[in-house]
Image (cartoon, rainbow, N blue to C red):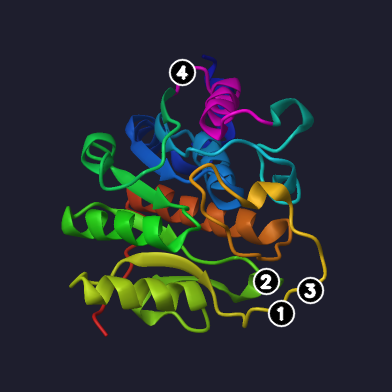
Amino acid sequence: MSEVRFSRTALLLGPSSMEKLKNARVAIIGLGGVGSYAVEALVRAGIGHFTLIDFDVVGESNFNRQLLALNHTLGKPKTEVMKQHIEDINPDAEVKTYPVFLDSTNREKLLPGQDFYLDAIDSLGPKCGLLEFAVKNNFKIISVMGSGNRLDPEQIHISPLNQTVNCPLARRVRKYLRSWGVDCNFPCVYSSELPRQILKDIPSPDEDLLHRGRIRGKVGTISYMPAIMGMMAASWIIRQILRMITLTLQSV
C-alpha cells in the first residue's frame, strides 16, 4: 500500500512512531456510537492490527450517532461492516472479527494477546465483567462511560475511574467492581455533565429488545457525544503506544 495514505501523520510523528502504530494490536469491544468512531481514529492513525467484538447488527435507531449506520449496512453485523470499513482505509490492516456476545464463557479465548483494549460496551453487566477480567489480567485498558442524555463536549474528561464525578454509569461500575475486589484505578473517558431528563412520550424503537432478550434502557443521544468520547479513548491508546503521555493513577 502507498505510504502516501499516512504521510500527513508521518510528518507529525516520524517513521519510528509510525512503525509502532503499524505493529500495535488493539481490541475494541463494542462497535456502537463510541466504538465505531474509536476504530475510525485508530485505523486512520495507522494502527495495523484489530480485534473487533460485537454481537449486534446495524439498526435504524443507530443512524443519529453511529459511524456504521448507512442505508446499505442495515441489518448487517457491525463487526463485518467495521472490518470492511477498516480495509477500505488500510488494506494491509489485520482484522479479526467476533460477532459474539462477550461473557465469561469466551473472554479467556478472545481477549488475550493484545497490546491495548478499548471498552465501549454500554450494558452494565457485560461491561463490569470485561473490566474485572482486564484488571485481574493486567490488561492495558481504557473504558468509556456514559455519553447519553448529555450535550456538552467541554465536560468530557479522561481520568481514573475512581476519580469520576456526575456519571451514574461510572458510579455503578465502581460499586460492582469494588464489591468484587477489583481496583478501579484504570483510565476512563467520562462526562462530568449532569445527565438531562429524557422526554418520556417519544416512542421507543422495537430494536431496543436485543437478540438475547434484554431490554435496553431508554437513553437520549446526540450525534457528536459518543463520537468524541470514542475518539478521546482512541487518542489515549495512540499516545500510550507512542509513550507520549503518562496517566497518573492514584488509589482513592
Numbered range of the magenta stretch: 75-93
Query: Does residue 56 appear left or right of residue 236 in this picture?
Result: right
Q: Residues within 10 Å of mark 1 (few under 14, many from 20)?
A: few
**Membership of 79 in magenta stretch:** yes
Secondary element at image label 4: loop
The answer to whether marks 1 and 2 mark residues whose Cβ atoms lie closer than 8 Å is yes
Residue at 22% from the left image edge and 59% from the top image edge: 135
Mark sitting earlier along the chain (2/4): 4
Q: Which mark is residue 199?
A: 3
The CA span between labels 2 and 4 is: 38 Å
When the figure is inspected, residue 138 is found, relative to residue 185, above or below; the finding is above
Residue 36: percent from left, percent from top = 57, 43
**Circle 1 sits on which residue?**
197
The CA span between labels 4 and 3 is: 46 Å
Looking at the picture, tell me which residue is in the foreground, 105 or 157: 105
Residue 112: percent from left, percent from top = 22, 39
Query: Does residue 33 appear left or right of residue 28 in this picture?
Result: right
Secondary element at image label 1: loop
The CA span between labels 3 and 1 is: 7 Å
Q: Residues within 10 Å of mark 2 (few under 14, many from 20)?
A: some
